[in-house]
Amino acid sequence: MNGITWHPDPILLQLGPLAVRYYSLLMTAGILLGYLSLKKSLLREKISEIDIDRLFIRLVLGLFLGARLAHCLFYDPGYYLAHPLEILLPIQISEGRIRFSGFSGLASHGGVVGLLAAAYWWCRKLKRPYLWLFDHLAFVAPLIAAMIRLGNFFNSEIIGTPSTYPWSVRFTLIDQIPRHPVQLYESLTYLVLYLLLIPGKAKRIEKRGQASGIVLSIIFSARFALEFLKSAQEEYISHFPISMGQLLSLPFLLMGIWLWIHSKKKQAE
């Protein structure tokens, strides 16, 4: 049988009813690394540590709330509208019984919207240009996204379509079919983007909108393309020619292209 067998326990450590998962650790590590990088950049811009910490708290809350709401309302609205408490509480209610289950399901598109809303709120309070902060965030976003997709791989979720390539993976927690490790494809794409952006960071920050445009364009182009290699995650739009993930990617892709072109026009003036 072709492919690599992947059968990890997604739980690293069990502490009574609480489970420490690889996904949570990787996501937390990505956010903390992003925070340290962002803090270093903003300190150079004469932003106080207190204001940076306030920004970080807002960004994390916006990221989580946006990602959670988008997953629940776009990918499984029927279930979550019938179980509204499970949207924001880490529980599962079945047959009148409440079980601690942790949160299952975060949508990156909603996370981006939540992040942008939190950033806009902070910029208004400090009277800073919104696109200036957006450009700073663009340099850390690919790293966080790469860590999250690696976490999805450990969770055996967002699996790929069947594949015959030698690097195919059998997610035995799901089935025995060799599949594209599409989580690793995405993670590697984002990591390469992050490594390519860093060397020219100072120059790109000066060109307002360029970093934001590059990151949005490349991340959501990759997301749109790789959706063709993902197994369907939603049933209610299965008759559409594109998936929900692709549909939600289009506005961000177009925004990125516009910002990229706009930054080039400003540079030429």
Image (spheres, rainbow, N blue to C red):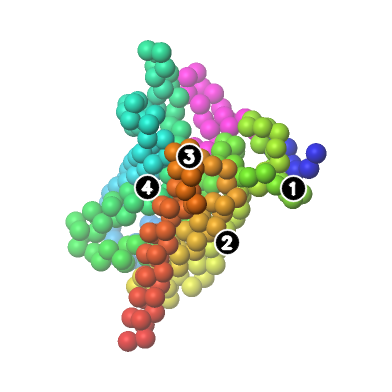
Looking at the rendered structure, the kind of residue marked 2 is Val
Badge nearest the viewer, 4 or 3: 3
Q: Which one is earlier in the sequence, the residue at label 4 or at label 2?
A: 4
Q: Which residues are magenta?
A: 8-27
Magenta-drawn stretch contains 47: no
Badge nearest the viewer, 4 or 2: 4
- Where disc 2 sits, the SS reads helix
Task: Write down the residue under mark 1.
Answer: 164
When the figure is inspected, residue 59 is found, relative to residue 82, above or below; the finding is below
- Where disc 3 sits, the SS reads loop
Q: How many marks?
A: 4
Viewer-proximal residue among 204 and 98? 98
Viewer-proximal residue among 218 and 136? 218
When the figure is inspected, residue 132 is found, relative to residue 232, above or below; the finding is below
Looking at the rendered structure, the kind of residue marked 4 is Gly
Query: Can you tell which quarter of the image residue 43 is in?
Result: bottom left
Looking at the rendered structure, the kind of residue marked 3 is Glu
Residue 56 seen: no
Q: Is residue 221 left or right of residue 118?
A: right
Q: Position of residue 38 (x, y in %)?
A: 40, 58
Q: Position of residue 78 (x, y in %)?
A: 38, 31
Task: Write down the residue under mark 4.
Answer: 110
Badge nearest the viewer, 3 or 2: 3
Label 3 and label 1: CA atoms lie apart by: 24 Å
Q: Position of residue 257 (x, y in %)?
A: 41, 69
Q: Which one is earlier in the sequence, the residue at label 4 or at label 3?
A: 4
